[in-house]
Image: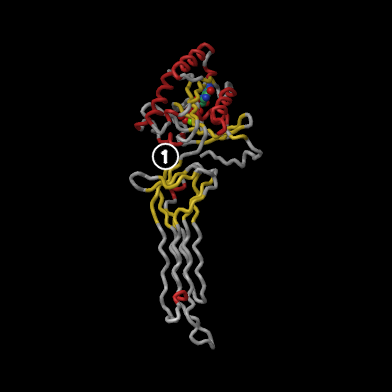
Amino acid sequence: MHFLDQAKIFVRSGAGGPGAVSFRREKYIEFGGPDGGDGGRGGDIVFEAVPGLNTLIDFRYTQHFRAPRGKGGAGSNRTGAGGGDLVIKVPVGTQILADDDERSLLADLTKAGERMTFLKGGLGGRGNASYKTSTNRAPRQHQTGEAGEEMWLWLRLKLLADVGLVGLPNAGKSTLLNSVSNAAAKVGDYPFTTLRPQLGVVRHKGREFVLADIPGLIEGAAEGAGIGDRFLGHVERTRLLLHLIDGAGDDPLNAWRVVRGELDSYGAGLGDKPEAIALTKADLLDSKQRSKIVKTLEKESGARVFPISAPLGEGMEPLLDTMIERLGAAAQEVAAKTADERSWSPL
Ligand SMILES: Nc1nc2c(ncn2[C@@H]2O[C@H](COP(=O)(O)OP(=O)(O)OP(=O)(O)O)[C@@H](O)[C@H]2O)c(=O)[nH]1
Ligand SMILES: [Mg+2]
């Protein structure tokens, strides 16, 4: 099982090209003088946040990124060509961390299209033409280009979603995501069907928001049980958690407690994040059972509990209404743009 939400990479900006040593030589012109041009600038390392990516998996295969060096200067005062910048495309929500003990945060790319020049390319060296003075008319000095900069760093992805789905395995999280959004998440009648976070865009009553589905949590996830809790990092930045509880499960109340416990142990404010609660698989319960479970859960959580059946589309309307309402301005009004323009993609 592999969650590639972080990756270690090496980056180096391009060195500047060397300056040239050259003298003008032409028929009928004596003592042509120095004409060695400067070297070109080395390429920068640039990070760009692009929509439509939501994994760092590519960085498992490509770990070294070197921007091209500047070209050398040449005779006839020709400056060397600059090395092109190397643009590294990362998903929106990628943080760049130093490879030190604290993993200090160097940059946080949160908007699509955001770009940052991370390492500057080296300056090109001076050619001998630039050393010419009245007393030194035939200089042989020149500079090699300035070296590029290099470092190891960590990329960490925290998906940017408005609402995060949490719950035990098999609670019906992916089923819900598929029924309300354009996602096509894998659904299965066994725990840990979902191994990687998935995003979907939900549209409801002229508004839209991004919903993130993550792997199920079990008791002890904070200590690594099941597949652990590191993917909770993906819901750290959401505004609202949607907690799903399997209505057909053995002990819905305990299910709620276990997940709450894991959210608290994880920290990072997850335990204090606003929570909406839905009781899934309500179609498998008769109305008496249903209202009993809803009542127990409401008493314990102090929140309203929405019974739903995502495959049948039952109970969805009030649940989505609440989410829109609780997201407030964060649930964007759907502008004239089409669904295709708003980029997203399942992993
Ligand atoms: N009858 C009924 N079955 C449901 C409902 N919602 C989900 N299921 C079934 O429950 C099983 C688990 O659903 P998933 O959506 O894969 O559950 P999950 O929470 O994403 O599970 P993990 O990814 O393993 O954590 C599947 O067999 C679904 O078909 C529902 O409302 N009614
Ligand atoms: Mg799932």
Tally the marks: 1
Residue 83 in percent (x, y) is at 49, 62
Compared across the picture, whether 219 is left or right of 51 comes to left
Q: Quadrant of residue 135?
A: bottom left
Q: In the displayed structure, would residue 307 be above or below residue 224?
A: above
Crowd around label 1: few <14 · some 14–19 · many ≥20 (10 Å): few
Residue 249 in percent (x, y) is at 45, 20
Q: Quadrant of residue 200?
A: top right
Which residue sits at x=41%, y=64%? Answer: 146
Which residue sits at x=66%, y=39%? Answer: 336
Residue 128 in percent (x, y) is at 45, 75
Q: Secondary structure at mark 1?
A: loop
Which residue sits at x=46%, y=19%? Answer: 302
Residue type beneath disc 1 = His
**Quick check: can you spot residue 188?**
no
Q: Quadrant of the N terminus?
A: top left
Question: Between residues 327 and 265, which one lies in front from this camera angle?
Answer: 327
Q: In the displayed structure, would residue 325 be above or below residue 97?
A: above
Q: Quadrant of residue 28?
A: bottom right
**Quick check: can you spot residue 124?**
yes
Residue at mark 1: 2
Direction right: furthest residue: 336
Residue 157 in percent (x, y) is at 45, 42
Which residue sits at x=51%, y=31%? Answer: 163
Direction top: furthest residue: 288
